[in-house]
Image: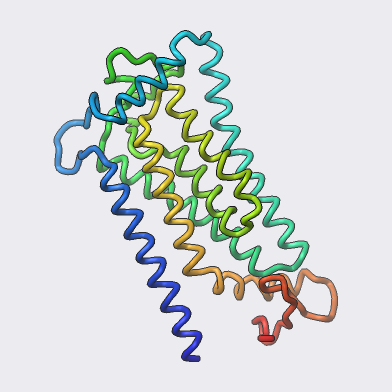
Amino acid sequence: MRTDSWNVGRRLLGSTVLLGAGAGAVTWLAPGGLGEAGPVKVVGGASASAYREVTGAMADAPAWVGTVLEVATEGTLVVLGLLLVLVWWLAVRRKDAHGVGATVLIGIGTVAAYGISEAVKLVVDEERPCRVVRGAAAIAECPTVGDWSFPSNHAALAAGLAVGLAVLRPRLAAVTLPVAAAAALLRVMVGVHYPHDVLAGAILAATVVVAVLLAFTPQGARLVSPLLGRLSGDDSGLVRHHGRRRPVVDGQAGQD
């Protein structure tokens, strides 16, 4: 019992530290906005300069390129979402309680990160670079006024899914992390976000999802174990925890 309590305490402490580090990084990247009456307009600095460089390289692209890149951005989220569903389904078929619980938590953590990102947008009120940076040419339609820029929701969704899958299945990192990076870069290329927007969104979601996994994966595995036992269709009542088969006793997985 003491060991279990110690492990839970360490997990919660680690999650708290991780969330604090993520919050600190997002705050450091934020251009201000708290307590200011009007929207924040970033027209100078390293991020604005990088934005001009990236969008300048795209300035002579045909009009259809913007549409293609926007579709590609959405495509990255579809790919990552399908990968999450695939990993979940494979875990269900293997009766892997750890995998099933973790994939559900990745989804929950990503949705939570999206909600936090939306809340931060309302606090910071950073205007879109395609509306305020002179000399920059956005190749995609600039979002409407009031659709704030910091942090990037697309980058948050992509990073949450990608990092969560990479933590759960490290071999997938070679696929998921480049796809998430592409999603973030595409938002800058089409001209609707600064580099610091997508970096903040990625950090926010990555820390939230990893913190959720760290704090709640054991509990998630215990919750889904009885369900997997019923789905097994045999009399063994066994489910897998971390690749090992354990019996379900009184609705909970037994210990080795």
Q: Is residue 182 above or below residue 177?
A: above
Where residue 138 sits, quadrant-wise, is top left
Q: Is residue 121 above or below residue 15?
A: above
Q: Is residue 79 above or below residue 96?
A: above
Residue at 59% across / 53% down in the picture? 165
Q: How many marks?
A: 0
Most foreground residue, 196 or 229: 196
Q: Residue furthest bottom?
A: 1
Residue 123: where, in percent of width, then height?
A: 25, 43
Residue 214: where, in percent of width, then height?
A: 49, 67
Drawn side of residue 13 relative to residue 90, left or right: left
What is the image's colouring? rainbow
Q: Quadrant of the C terminus?
A: bottom right
Where residue 148 sits, quadrant-wise, is top left
Q: Is residue 18 above or below residue 66?
A: below
Residue at 70% across / 51% down in the picture? 86
Most foreground residue, 67 or 18: 18
Residue 142: where, in percent of width, then height?
A: 39, 20
Residue at 27% across / 48% down in the picture? 27
Drawn side of residue 162 relative to residue 35, left or right: right
Residue at 48% across / 56% down in the picture? 209
Drawn side of residue 94 relative to residue 134, left or right: right
Residue 75: where, in percent of width, then height?
A: 60, 33
Most foreground residue, 228 or 181: 181
